[in-house]
Image (cartoon, grey):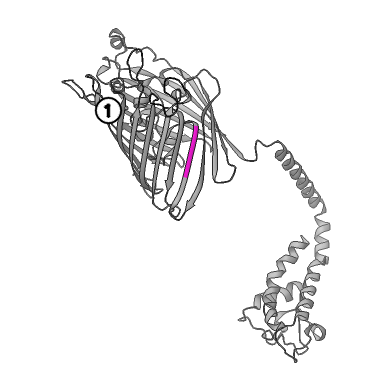
């Protein structure tokens, strides 16, 4: 503490001796030896030439009245406008620092009075130091941040007419209550401060209604309770210039949308509403990928341009070397996705273009629908080898939370390259998401999403009746129990999810509750 006390005096003393450098260069024979002829004072008011309007008044008052280390001339003058020699400055600085180091009677009295309390505080400080040492010795990593989350799901679905659906060959059988979970560990590792190695470990047991194509949840994780590496990639920013920041991403398990600016702000229950519509543009499969992203330099909260180009090969094909596959092989299922946008914290608009190529099964001639459309739909089952998609995304947030919600939208148009009849030549999808933040209670959220259940065919080659359609709507409410615990009841309705191929009675309503624990 003595060192800190001494250092606290330095600004005040320096304010008095600032002209020293100039004074040392002057030849002033009449300068008095202030340190030798001075008389000690106890109040700044004893100086005859010091006034409250002087710029150094507060500094002098502190030095005189608190520390008593400033003296004046025998005639009670301070002569603050005269130059000071280096000798005088040294004598003044030494006197003040010596006074700070003295232990006064008051300090001795207080030390004795609070001797027991000081001993307790000293013991606690020693204990904290020991605990910090233990934590440093056993900490997870000096470079890695670990974030975890556990989600529990309980609920089920009911069908419009389950019996009729099954009599016509449908599979409307899994409508009982189920209890499922998803467990996630995220590890962010930085080596330079401008990079990040991301690894996600995930497990789940959701081989049930929540992972079926016509009721797939956004947070679903199909699995056998095994903890596996679910995502892994590395991104770095080697170029930061006046025009913006460039970020490169390479990954062994990555999806295209992880290498883009997030184009919406609505977090859905159904996967079909994810990222403004998870059917054509955003529908993807995890695989080997590379990406380049650029963001314009802009002030915090201000709008700016962004752009990205990404390439991901199907997870199976990308790791193979046979049959002309591999990451860039001619038989490799791949997704090349590009985005350009202009956004701020409150609003944003984005244009996307995607080219998706699906491999054709060598035995049956069928198309790999997961690579063609993101996941199975009637339109995907009829697609040819390639699909070009144009998409638009946007979001807008009000300045204040209230009756006006945050709005997210998406729309997709797909054109398939096909020469066979009964294959889709055009596809279409849309969604809109509304989110009321702090609804009813601080920290809680109310949300409603609606739109097409993935994309569907609007033109089929050689067919007299082209148009298919589907629809879904959902609503949920987030109860923020604590900072790390959230309960989310939700309900949704899905109509004609399989398009024209759906049997009567298969429309479904789902009810569930999700509990999320973050750590």
Q: Is residue 262 left or right of residue 44?
A: left
Give how far across and how far down residue 455 sits, in percent. Answer: 30, 28
Q: Quadrant of residue 359?
A: top left
- Reading the image, the residue beneath label 1 is 416
Q: Quadrant of residue 378?
A: top left
Quadrant for the N terminus in the image: bottom right
Quadrant for the C terminus in the image: top right
- Asked if one can make out residue 142 in the rendered structure from this viewpoint, the answer is yes
For the stretch drawn in magenta, the main secondary structure is strand
Residue 120 higher or lower than 230, as above or below: below
Quick one: 150 or 438, which is closer to the camera? 150
Please tell me which residue is depicted at 49% across the width and 19% down the height of the picture.
223
Residue 429 higher or lower than 73, as above or below: above
The magenta segment: 247-251
- Considering every residue shown, the one lying at the far top of the view is 167
Give how far across and how far down residue 381 sits, in percent. Answer: 31, 20
- Asked if one can make out residue 41 in the rendered structure from this viewpoint, the answer is no
**Is residue 72 found inside the magenta-colored segment of the image?**
no
Please tell me which residue is depicted at 26% across the width and 17% down the height of the picture.
501
- Considering every residue shown, the one lying at the far left of the view is 464
Secondary element at tag 1: strand
Please tell me which residue is depicted at 33% across the width and 39% down the height of the picture.
352
Quick one: 405 or 145, which is closer to the camera? 145
Residue 27 higher or lower than 500, as above or below: below
* Total residue callouts: 1
Q: Quadrant of residue 469?
A: top left
Quick one: 453 or 49, which is closer to the camera? 453
Give how far across and how far down residue 438 sits, in percent. Answer: 43, 42
Residue 444 higher or lower than 73, as above or below: above
Sort mark 1 into few (<14), some (14-19) or many (20+) by Cα contacts within 10 Å.
many
Give how far across and how far down residue 322 sits, in percent. Answer: 45, 20
């Amino acid at each position: 503490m003595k060192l800190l006390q001494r250092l606290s005096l330095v600004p005040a003393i320096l304010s008095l001796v600032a002209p020293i450098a100039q004074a040392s260069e002057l030849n002033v024979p009449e300068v008095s030896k202030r340190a030798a002829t001075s008389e000690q004072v106890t109040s700044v008011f004893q100086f005859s030439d010091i006034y409250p309007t002087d710029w150094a008044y507060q500094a002098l008052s502190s030095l005189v009245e608190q520390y008593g280390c400033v003296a004046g001339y025998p005639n009670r003058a301070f002569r603050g406008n005269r130059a000071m020699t280096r000798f005088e400055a040294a004598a003044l600085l030494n006197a003040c620092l010596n006074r700070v180091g003295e232990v006064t009677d008051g300090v001795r009295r207080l030390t004795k009075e609070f001797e027991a309390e000081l001993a307790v505080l000293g013991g606690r400080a020693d204990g904290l130091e020991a605990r910090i040492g233990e934590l440093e010795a056993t900490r997870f990593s000096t470079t890695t941040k670990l974030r975890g989350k556990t989600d529990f799901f309980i609920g089920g679905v009911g069908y419009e007419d389950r019996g009729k659906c099954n009599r016509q060959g449908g599979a409307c059988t899994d409508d009982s209550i189920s209890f499922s979970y998803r467990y996630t560990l995220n590890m962010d590792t930085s080596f330079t401060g401008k990079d990040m190695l991301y690894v996600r470990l995930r497990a789940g047991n959701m081989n049930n209604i929540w992972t079926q194509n016509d009721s797939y949840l956004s947070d679903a994780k199909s699995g056998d309770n095994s903890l596996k590496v679910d995502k892994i990639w590395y991104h770095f920013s080697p170029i930061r210039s006046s025009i913006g920041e460039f970020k490169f991403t390479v990954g062994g398990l990555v999806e295209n949308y992880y290498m883009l600016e997030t184009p919406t702000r609505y977090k859905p229950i159904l996967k079909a509403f994810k990222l403004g519509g998870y059917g054509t543009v955003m529908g993807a499969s995890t695989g080997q990928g590379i990406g380049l992203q650029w963001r314009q330099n802009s002030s915090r909260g201000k709008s700016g341009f962004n752009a990205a180009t990404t390439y991901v090969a199907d997870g199976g094909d990308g790791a193979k070397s046979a049959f002309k596959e591999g990451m860039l092989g001619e038989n490799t299922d791949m997704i090349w996705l590009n985005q350009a946008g202009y956004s701020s914290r409150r609003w944003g608009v984005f244009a996307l273009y995607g080219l998706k190529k699906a491999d054709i099964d060598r035995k049956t001639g069928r198309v790999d629908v997961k690579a063609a459309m993101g996941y199975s739909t009637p339109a995907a089952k009829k697609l040819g080898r390639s699909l070009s998609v144009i998409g638009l995304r946007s979001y807008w947030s009000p300045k204040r939370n209230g009756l006006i919600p945050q709005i997210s939208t998406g729309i997709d148009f797909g054109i398939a390259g096909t020469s066979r009849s009964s294959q889709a030549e055009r596809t279409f999808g849309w969604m809109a998401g509304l989110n009321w933040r702090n609804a009813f209670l601080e920290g809680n959220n109310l949300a409603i999403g609606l739109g097409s259940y993935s994309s569907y065919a609007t033109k089929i080659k050689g067919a007299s009746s082209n148009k298919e359609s589907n629809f879904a709507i959902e609503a949920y409410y987030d109860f923020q129990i604590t900072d790390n615990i959230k309960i989310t009841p939700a309900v949704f309705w899905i109509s004609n999810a399989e398009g024209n191929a759906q049997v009567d009675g298969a429309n479904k309503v789902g009810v569930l509750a999700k509990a999320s624990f973050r750590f």
